[in-house]
Amino acid sequence: MSARERSSPAPRDARGSHDPPGGRAEVRRRASNRHSWQDAPLGGTDEGQSRRIEGVFAALADPTRRQLLEALSRRPASTATMLAAHVPVSRQAVAKHLATLRESRLVTSHRAGKEVLFSVRPDELAATASWMTSLAATWQQRLQRLKEAAES
């Protein structure tokens, strides 16, 4: 490969972008194309509660984080090193997953000497479960009314 070929920019794709599909430019483009309903709070919630519920779902979307929560529920006050034995990722990856869980308020941490101990915070899970129960009840009522209307 010549020096000119190495220094020339990558060819543009059909979208006119140098970024590969799924790259930063596409993420920005998709974010700017959000619909107004996507920015509205979840039904029956205020803006802050809606953001917390979204954070819980985002944190729980990763199977490793779910495994970490399960391990913490069985063994409270664990270190990242102790938890790394329960998941197929490195201790550093566990620490990053725990930071995400902490940001979403699913776990709490405190320092005990040189170690940082993590524990589950059930209140955010309970709030999310409560919202889901409320949503399910609303849909159950709607389906019941639809059934009654179809049968009459």
Image (cartoon, rainbow, N blue to C red):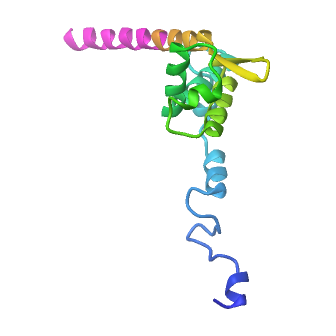
Q: Which SS does the magenta portion mostly show?
A: helix
Q: Residue at x 65, y 69 (%)?
A: 18
* Left or right of 84 on screen, residue 108: right
* Residue 79 image offset from top left, x and y in percent: 65, 23
Q: Is residue 10 above or below residue 30?
A: below
The one nearer the camera, 23 or 94, is 94
* Residue 109 image offset from top left, x and y in percent: 71, 18
Residue projecting furthest to the bottom = 2
Residue extent of the magenta highlight: 134-152
* Residue 98 image offset from top left, x and y in percent: 64, 28
Q: Quadrant of residue 43?
A: top right
In the rendered image, the quadrant that contains the C terminus is top left
Q: Quadrant of residue 80?
A: top right
In the rendered image, the quadrant that contains the N terminus is bottom right
Q: Residue at x 73, y 82 (%)?
A: 7
Q: How many marks?
A: 0
* Residue 120 image offset from top left, x and y in percent: 60, 14
The one nearer the camera, 7 or 149, is 7
